[in-house]
Amino acid sequence: MNGLDALRGTTPAKPHDARAIAALAANPGCARRALMDGAGVDKDRAARHLGFPAPFGQSPFAITRGNAFEALVKADGCAELLRMLRELLRLPIDEVAYQDVHNVGAHLRHTHTRALFDRAAREEQGTLYDHPLLSLRIAGHTAYLEPDVVAFQRGKQFHIVEIKSFAVIDGQADPAAVAAAARQAAVYVLALRTLLEELGHDPLRVAHDVVLVCPENFANRPVATLVDVRRQLAVLKRQLARMTSIDRLLAELPDGVTFDLRPDDEGVPTRPAAELAEALHQVAARYAPDCLSTCDLCFFCRDEARRDGASDLLGRQVRDALGGVATVEEALELAEGRRDPAPGQEEIARLLRDAERLRRECLA
């Protein structure tokens, strides 16, 4: 049993899907999440056992609406999607080929997907591949991923197509929803680039611009736009590299630490919640308000941060811009010279002091 298996214990490993992998990119500096995801620990079940369940998951209404919108976009061999791709990618009229990979059966889909994309890249055959099945190695485990559609423009590039049911109103969509869709699409881009590289093709034939399809305004008419996911790809690669070299984090753990829930024959956790909480406290978390929309352990980590006196946590973007300064109090102490900067924070401290000086001058 390797270190990650021992960390998970007798609890079955939870397979990674695209949403879970995408969430890794939302908090790349959290050691607790890196270890739990690397070991395949079910964070949702752990959070519920600890008494801090996260209110995640779509409502049945939202799921039904999303399925209906996807069916509309894919109806008649993705006819509506082809219309949008002709406008967005200048797709020639004669490129109307359509492959539904789902028809070959679940056990053959991954192999069939590899064969189809290999032939497309070699023989310049396209256009749309529905229900393809890709794979990506995550900390020694293989995760199988299903993008909505992959489009291939002959002589050019593959494009991941992501179909979402949140609306674009007057040309604007919810930024948080778009960011989440971009992170998820970046997972598919990385998986398809990995596949092409394994087949001996140029991985950059997979475009970093993904096609995001959403309903326009308050009607169900779909509209497509290109979203650049290069930043999300860079963060995702860093986090996955960190997970594959996770031995350093494991080595820092005290002996005997495990996140095992000790499930009984029916899968119900039997480990005392206080004991599991104590094990989790042995691993540093990087909680920020953003975690409330991306991590199943968010309420547990928030409670821990508040107990530690960090009730004024900065958002992650601000924290990263300030070189890891985590709280409003810490930022103020650096700005006022009441705290010595940590290694690497000297420049940030100087900028904060300059900002504080300018603030006083303006007030005077």
Image (cartoon, rainbow, N blue to C red):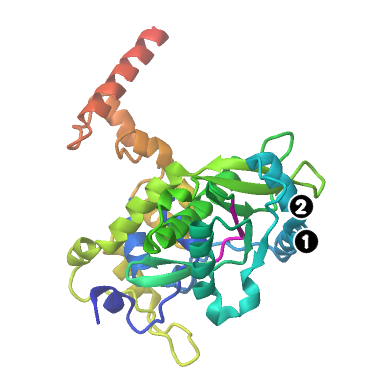
| Up-down relation of residue 55 to residue 353 (above or below) | below
Q: Which mark is residue 80?
A: 2
Is 157 magenta? The answer is no
Q: Residue at x 44, y 43 (%)?
A: 230
Q: Is residue 108 visible?
A: yes
Relative side of 254 to 61, left or right: left
Q: Which mark is residue 309?
A: none
- Secondary structure beneath dot 1 equals helix
Report the front residue among 89 and 336.
Answer: 89
Instruction: Provide the residue span drawn in magenta.
Output: 146-152
Q: Position of residue 342 (x, y in %)?
A: 19, 37
Instruction: Residue lying at the far right in this picture: please name it.
Output: 219
Relative side of 234 to 129, left or right: left
- Secondary structure beneath dot 2 equals helix
Mark 1 highlights which residue? 75
Q: Residue at x 77, y 61 (%)?
A: 75
Report the front residue among 53 and 336.
Answer: 53
Q: Amino acid at mark 1?
A: Ala
The answer to whether mark 1 and mark 2 are in CB contact below 8 A is yes
Q: Amino acid at mark 2?
A: Glu
Q: Quadrant of residue 72?
A: bottom right
Q: Quadrant for the C terminus, please.
A: top left
Q: Residue at x 30, y 78 (%)?
A: 5
What is the spatial separation of the Cα atoms under label 1 and label 2, in whole angstroms?
7 Å
Q: Quadrant of residue 355?
A: top left
Q: Quadrant of residue 264?
A: bottom left
Q: Is residue 40 visible?
A: no
- Total label count? 2
Q: Residues within 10 Å of mark 1 (few under 14, many from 20)?
A: few
Report the front residue among 354 and 73.
Answer: 73
Q: Residues within 10 Å of mark 2 (few under 14, many from 20)?
A: some
